[in-house]
Amino acid sequence: MSVNKLLVAGAGQMGAGIAQVSAVAGLEVVMIDVADEFIARGMAGIEKGLGRLVEKGRMEAGARDAALARISTSTDIAAGADADLFLEAAPESMELKQELFEKAAATLRPDAIIATNTSSLSVSKLAAFVTEPVRFVGIHFFNPVPMMALVEVVRGEQTSDETLSAARSFAEAVGKTAITVTDSPGFVVNRILFPMINEAANAYHESVASAGDIDTGMKLGANWPMGPLALADLVGLDTTKAILETLERELGEARYTPSPALGELVAAGRLGRKSGSGFYDYGK
């Protein structure tokens, strides 16, 4: 099955990024969210991102306009009822995702693929919320979507070979490299990455070094393109904490226990770039 029309649920950083790369690749996209203000914010981000590409000479103005024209928006899931693929990009809440998947299963065609962009929740457990779980799959993009080349395609216990193949083809069609992963907490990248971010947060909490020096150490000493604390700010400290909590719960290992620094910053509303401050201040 080929994907020509995509329905994205969530107009935040991830959802808007997925909508952007899909529209640039020529797919028709419907992006939905619960409120018009969220949709407006997501579209503004897409327009800004494509505008930067035009300014840098990496995209023609006509191609930008054509991509934007391929994106429609709504607060009603029925606006994308004829989509070939439904991809959820909502916050990491099992209850919220359950509601979305039940609506998608009741609204889309019986043969439409239903997918989650979850970074840590069980694909097999989420599949229980849809009819015919053979059509359910994980399609995990990385943030920021337009810049990151990887997609983890996650096979649930009942995901069919056809669904898996279609998901990989979709990822490749929007310009990404796909790797196939068995459903497991954190999949591959986050299972390895987030304990490293957490250890950096512990070093910060214990005053081993400043945030800037920790990040400089990892950039110059380990060749990371971005320091782990700056990366946590980009991901969102609330999201980082939630992923670690999921890993701790599912794997039962203390090394995934979120650093006290994460708990303190999240409690203070310092969630990273999206709130204007986290390990760093962003002047918002």
Image (cartoon, grey):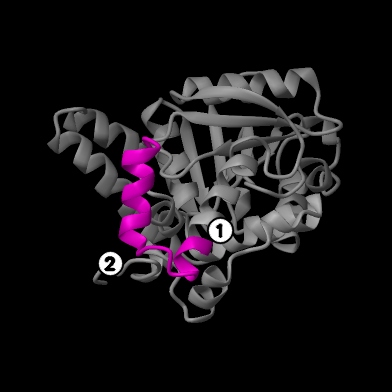
Mark 1 falls on what kind of element?
helix
- Based on the picture, tell me whether residue 99 belongs to the magenta stretch: no
| The quadrant where residue 68 appears | top left
Q: Which mark is residue 282?
A: 2
- Based on the picture, tell me whether residue 218 belongs to the magenta stretch: yes
Q: Quadrant of the C terminus?
A: bottom left
> In the image, residue 30 lies at what x, y percent?
50, 43
For the question of whether residue 225 can be seen, the reply is: no
Q: Amino acid at mark 1?
A: Thr
Give the main secondary structure, helix, strand or loop, of the magenta stretch.
Answer: helix
In the displayed structure image, the side of residue 130 where residue 44 appears, left or right: left
Seen from the viewer's position, the closer of residues 246 and 132 is 246
> In the image, residue 179 lies at what x, y percent?
61, 23
| Residue appearing at x 86%, y 31% in the figure | 158
The residue range painted magenta reads 202-225
> In the image, residue 36 lies at what x, y percent?
45, 65
Decide: few, some or many residues near mark 2? Use Cα within 10 Å; few <14, some 14-19, many ≥20. Answer: few
| Residue appearing at x 28%, y 44% in the figure | 49
Which residue in the protein does label 1 denote? 240
Q: Amino acid at mark 2?
A: Tyr
**Callout 1–callout 2 Cβ contact below 8 Å:** no
Seen from the viewer's position, the closer of residues 50 and 251 is 251
Mark 2 falls on what kind of element?
loop
